[in-house]
Image: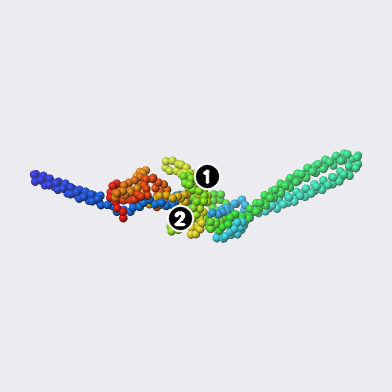
């Protein structure tokens, strides 16, 4: 029993000794690390032009588009005058409707108009005859009764002629309507472009597919939305840069052409509730739309403002809660300072307060950097 207890005691002492030795070695290394200066990159504030931007997603669409839908009420398609890929100008005849009923109505209306003209001519001739009889009878004083009768007949003929004129005007008006409907049987393009699609004409009211789709691929536009906050700074005429993941090495330049004055309220929902997201439609034109195509999803960076500012590389800035800090080197040691920032870009951040242009600032401060550690410049 005594021997076993002795062995256990020796083992415990040995383990404790090992831990003490390990602790001493680790402590010595920590002290050595603390005393060894860190070699880091240092910079100072740089005065340069900094650009404020707003970045929005968007979709490429053609500026000039036209969707022509088949209207069954106008009749069947008689003839299609274009093919996919054809270039068309404004007022190019695209296709014709065939409407036999309308043609019959026009011929019928022509007969009605002719009949009304004949009726009016007949009544005018009758008026002339009655006027001659009245003139002849006026010389004979004893024919007063017959004169009164002629006067009554003239009034009736005049009334009938006025009614016939009204009927004629109605017939001519109806004919104008028919002729306008006949013009609409010839469908013309309202814009210039290329025939992108020709689909089967459908009489199904639920089918939203256009019969003919015309687009101008030479003039493309980014269609997107901005938030109510960004709507305060994005204006028409501002410059923009357009990029897409499909062509990562390409970029296009453009201009903000349109910012809606009214929001497009969109309903969003999640598991707990629904809400309305206020967004403003925006259009950005593309100067030289080579390689890019309608339908591409793009990111548009809009230049909203630029000014001279004191800046640091974005890698120098650290965030602790709501506070932005940088590490300066003072008397060879790291000192943290709280700074107030302004505009930031992908690579730079504007410094408004907290440091001056003589302070040496550490870039990419390592996690092991602590307040008061010795630092040297690379």
Vertical order, 81 against 372 (above or below): below
Instruction: Answer whether labels 2 and 1 touch (C-beta < 8 Å).
Output: no
Q: Is residue 180 left or right of residue 306?
A: right
Q: Residues within 10 Å of mark 1 (few under 14, many from 20)?
A: few
Q: Nearer the viewer, residue 361 or 203?
A: 361
Q: Position of residue 90 (x, y in %)?
A: 60, 56
Q: Residue at x 89, y 44 (%)?
A: 136
Residue located beneath label 1 in the image: 262
Q: Position of residue 168 (x, y in %)?
A: 73, 47
Q: Nearer the viewer, residue 312 or 83?
A: 312
Residue located beneath label 2 in the image: 243
Q: Is residue 176 left or right of residue 58?
A: right
Give the SS element for disc 1. loop
Q: Residue at x 59, y 58 (%)?
A: 89
Mark 2 or mark 1: which comes first in sequence?
Answer: 2
Q: CA distance from mark 2 to mark 1?
A: 27 Å
Q: Does residue 166 appear in this view?
A: yes
Q: Does residue 223 appear in this view?
A: no
Q: Position of residue 27 (x, y in %)?
A: 21, 48
Please identify the quarter of the rendering in which residue 41 is found.
Answer: bottom left
Q: Nearer the viewer, residue 38 or 76?
A: 38
Q: Position of residue 66 (x, y in %)?
A: 56, 54
Q: Residues within 10 Å of mark 2 (few under 14, many from 20)?
A: many
How is the model colour-coded?
rainbow
């Amino acid at each position: 029993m005594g021997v076993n207890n002795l062995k256990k005691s020796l083992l415990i002492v040995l383990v404790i000794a090992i831990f003490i030795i390990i602790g001493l070695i680790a402590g010595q290394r920590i002290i050595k690390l603390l005393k060894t200066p860190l070699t880091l990159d240092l910079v100072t504030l740089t005065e340069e032009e900094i650009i404020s931007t707003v970045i929005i997603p968007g979709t490429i669409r053609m500026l000039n588009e036209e969707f022509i839908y088949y209207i069954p009420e106008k009749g069947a398609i008689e003839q299609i005058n274009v093919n996919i890929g054809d270039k068309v100008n404004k007022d190019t005849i695209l296709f014709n409707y065939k409407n036999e009923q309308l043609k019959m109505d026009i011929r019928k209306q022509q007969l009605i108009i002719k009949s009304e003209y004949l009726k009016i001519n007949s009544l005018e001739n009758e008026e002339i005859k009655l006027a001659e009889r009245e003139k002849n009878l006026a010389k004979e004083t004893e024919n007063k009764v017959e004169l009164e009768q002629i006067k009554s007949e003239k009034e009736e003929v005049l009334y009938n002629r006025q009614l016939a004129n009204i009927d004629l005007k109605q017939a001519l008006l109806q004919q104008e309507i028919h002729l306008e409907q006949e013009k609409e049987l010839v469908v013309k393009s309202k814009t210039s472009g290329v025939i992108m699609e020709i689909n089967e004409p459908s009489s199904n009211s639920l089918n939203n597919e256009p019969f003919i789709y015309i687009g101008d691929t030479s003039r493309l536009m980014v269609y997107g939305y901005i938030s109510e906050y960004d709507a305060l700074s994005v204006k028409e005429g501002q410059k923009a840069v357009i990029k897409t993941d499909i062509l990562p090495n390409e970029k296009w330049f453009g201009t903000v052409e349109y910012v809606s004055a009214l929001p497009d309220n969109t309903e969003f929902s999640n598991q707990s509730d629904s809400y309305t997201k206020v967004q403003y439609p925006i259009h950005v034109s593309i100067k030289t739309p080579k390689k890019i195509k309608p339908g591409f999803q793009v990111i548009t960076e809009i230049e909203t403002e630029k000014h001279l500012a004191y800046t640091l590389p974005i890698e120098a800035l650290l965030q602790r809660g709501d506070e932005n800090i940088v590490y300066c080197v003072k008397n060879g040691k790291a000192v943290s300072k709280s700074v107030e920032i302004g505009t930031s870009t992908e690579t730079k951040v504007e410094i408004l307060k907290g440091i001056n242009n003589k302070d040496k600032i550490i870039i990419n401060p390592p996690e092991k950097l602590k307040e008061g550690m010795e630092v040297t410049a690379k």
